[in-house]
Image (spheres, helix red, strand yellow):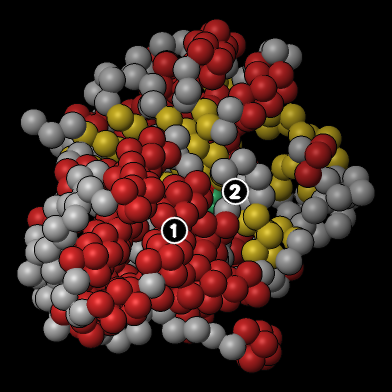
């Protein structure tokens, strides 16, 4: 039986259109899912929308729609964007799906029956006209952040989940395993939340209706996190008959969550408490990346600085956008997106470096060998050792980096080999070798080595840039078996005599000044 691998994006709030920040997490998960499928895993890749809550209820009201109409429309936009970005998810969950609602009610009841949920009082700052509770830290200048009016101290009956019984296990998971990446976030969680003593979590509300009713007290709806986090198991069929995939959550199974740092606390503390209360195994990895900012500011609808993935993808190509965001988001930090950086990456890395390597290699085989890859009779030629060693060792490196997952470093490693191959062309000067006679064994060896490097690099790039990889394989004549996972680390497996064929330019170069001024006018 194949080993399983389960990877999840957060389920996004359908309170506005998806932007490049959502795209980053989803495309990063897609890349890992594709890599793991290629490695032979049985992969389940999930995403979805988190559709309940007061904010959604209010946004729908403002839009003159029912909450259900409103979320239907926006969930549709998320689905369209993932299709456009070539995201190969296996399952899209919506928290308004009946099977999810049924399972959440059972989960809530199960935790309650075990004595971890109790009824208490939620105290907070209340805005009477808005009928909304706020925490002290959410207030703006001591006033309601929505309408700017005065707030009063108020309380409301609510259910709470005890967190302290789980503190020790949570701390152990965070400090003694590699669960949370990057590791810098572990101290933040332990020092800021666990050491001072975990506070009980409010898990129900009565001031809005758009949610899943608490089964034994229907005046209450389940508040946010039990509903949202449970998606990771309900979509596999936990406590419902809609799916039969709970094997992906078995003890010891490979499970990876990805989020940005905004919800790391929920995934590293609260989710672990819920799983522990349900006696379920813990996931293996949580990677929480940084913020995607736009020219120095956090991207947000209200700031009007949202970068539109549809526009970028249509203008520059989906794979170019995938590449740039995956390459430039640092593993442990925020990323300041700019259109200029996007265009510079496309020109420098994709057009001038990778595109150039492919087109020069194919053009030379066409010119000197009539388009048929020659046999490498000098396979162990010393002068080529460095390139062969680098390309041959590449897949072992990317395998390790995908596990962490450190995607920008994986791309950096692949592009280092691509740069080395371009340098190899300059060093070996095939056009001079051709003067010794078009069929010289040395020229054949050089072109064979270049094609092998392109084969290895493009197969490792396929999970990042799926459409590009196919175009490259067509040009170098690589059949599917030549780009299988077991061939990625095996130098010299592209058979001789395959026909190469120059195709259209894979990456066009852009006039950056002109593009920036046009993007500015959109
Ligand atoms: O928090 N930079 O939903 P959400 C990087 N429903 N990533 C970003 C980003 C940015 N500027 N903006 C959004 C929720 N993201 C809950 C999650 S999960 C059980 C429930 C991505 O719509 C990033 O993955 O606010 C972040 O964690 C997520 O969107 C937040 O999505």
The numbered dot on residue 437 is none
Using the rendered image of the protein, determine whether residue 39 is visible from the camera's viewpoint: yes
| Residue 366 screen position, x and y as percent | 20, 83
Q: Pick the residue in front: 42 or 82.
A: 42
The crowding category of the residue bearing disc 2, from other C-alpha atoms within 10 Å (few below 14, some 14 to 19, many at least 20), is: some
Figure check: 336 above or below 209: below
Task: Name the secondary structure under disc 1.
Answer: helix
| Residue 227 screen position, x and y as percent | 44, 38
- Pick the quarter of the image with the N terminus: top left
User: Image point 78% across, 49% down: which residue?
Assistant: 128
The numbered dot on residue 330 is 2
Q: Is residue 10 left or right of residue 519?
A: left
Q: Is residue 459 left or right of residue 342?
A: left
Figure check: 178 above or below 181: above
Using the rendered image of the protein, determine whether residue 89 is visible from the camera's viewpoint: no
| Residue 149 screen position, x and y as percent | 87, 55
Q: CA distance from mark 1 to mark 2?
A: 23 Å
User: Image point 26% across, 51% down: which residue?
Assistant: 381
* Disc 1: which residue: 420
User: Image point 71% across, 47% down: which residue?
Assistant: 132
The crowding category of the residue bearing disc 1, from other C-alpha atoms within 10 Å (few below 14, some 14 to 19, many at least 20), is: some
Task: Name the secondary structure under disc 2.
Answer: loop
Find the residue positioned furthest to the front: 436
Mark 1 in CB contact with mark 2 (< 8 angstroms): no
Figure check: 23 above or below 121: below
């Amino acid at each position: 039986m194949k080993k399983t691998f389960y990877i999840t994006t957060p389920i996004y709030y359908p309170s506005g259109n998806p932007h490049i920040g959502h795209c980053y997490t989803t495309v990063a998960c897609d890349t890992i899912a594709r890599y793991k499928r290629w490695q032979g895993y049985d992969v389940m890749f999930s995403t979805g929308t988190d559709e309940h809550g007061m904010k959604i209820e209010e946004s729908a009201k403002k839009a003159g729609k029912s909450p259900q109409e409103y979320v239907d429309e926006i969930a549709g936009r998320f689905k369209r964007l993932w299709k456009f970005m070539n995201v190969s998810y296996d399952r899209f969950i919506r928290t308004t799906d009946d099977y999810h609602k049924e399972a959440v009610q059972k989960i809530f009841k199960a935790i309650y029956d075990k004595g971890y949920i109790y009824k208490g009082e939620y105290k907070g700052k209340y805005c009477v006209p808005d009928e909304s509770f706020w925490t002290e830290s959410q207030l703006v200048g001591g006033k309601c952040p929505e309408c700017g009016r005065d707030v009063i101290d108020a309380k409301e009956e609510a259910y709470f989940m005890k967190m302290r019984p789980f503190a020790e296990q949570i701390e152990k998971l965070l400090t003694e395993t590699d669960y949370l990446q990057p590791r810098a976030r572990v101290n933040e969680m332990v020092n800021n939340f666990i050491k001072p003593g975990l506070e009980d979590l409010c898990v129900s509300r009565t001031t809005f209706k758009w949610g899943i009713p608490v089964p034994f007290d229907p005046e209450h709806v389940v508040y946010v996190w039990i509903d949202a986090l449970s998606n990771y198991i309900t979509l596999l069929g936990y406590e419902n008959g809609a799916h039969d995939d709970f094997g992906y959550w078995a003890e010891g199974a490979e499970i990876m969550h990805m989020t940005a740092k905004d919800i790391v606390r929920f995934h590293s503390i609260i989710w672990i408490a819920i799983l522990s209360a349900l006696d379920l195994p813990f996931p293996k990895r949580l990677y929480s990346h940084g913020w995607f900012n736009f020219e120095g500011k956090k991207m947000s609808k209200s700031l009007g600085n949202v970068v539109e993935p549809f526009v970028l993808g249509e203008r520059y190509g989906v794979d170019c956008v995938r590449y740039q965001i995956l390459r430039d988001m640092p593993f442990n930090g925020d990323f300041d997106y700019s259109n200029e950086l996007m265009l510079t990456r496309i020109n420098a890395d994709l057009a001038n470096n990778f595109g150039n390597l492919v087109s020069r290699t194919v053009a030379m085989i066409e010119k000197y060998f009539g388009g048929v890859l020659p046999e490498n009779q000098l396979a162990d030629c010393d002068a080529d050792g460095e390139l062969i060693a680098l390309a041959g060792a590449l897949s072992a490196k990317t395998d390790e980096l995908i596990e962490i997952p450190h995607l920008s470093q994986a791309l950096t490693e692949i592009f280092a080999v691509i740069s080395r191959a371009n340098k190899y062309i300059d060093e070996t000067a095939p056009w001079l070798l051709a003067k010794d006679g078009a069929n010289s064994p040395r020229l054949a060896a050089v072109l064979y080595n270049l094609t092998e490097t392109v084969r290895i690099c493009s197969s490792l790039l396929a999970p990042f840039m799926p459409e590009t990889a196919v175009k490259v394989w067509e040009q170098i004549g690589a059949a599917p078996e030549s780009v299988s996972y077991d061939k990625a680390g095996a130098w010299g497996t592209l058979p001789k005599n395959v026909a190469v064929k120059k195709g259209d330019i894979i990456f066009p170069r852009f006039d950056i000044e002109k593009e920036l001024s046009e993007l500015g006018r959109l």
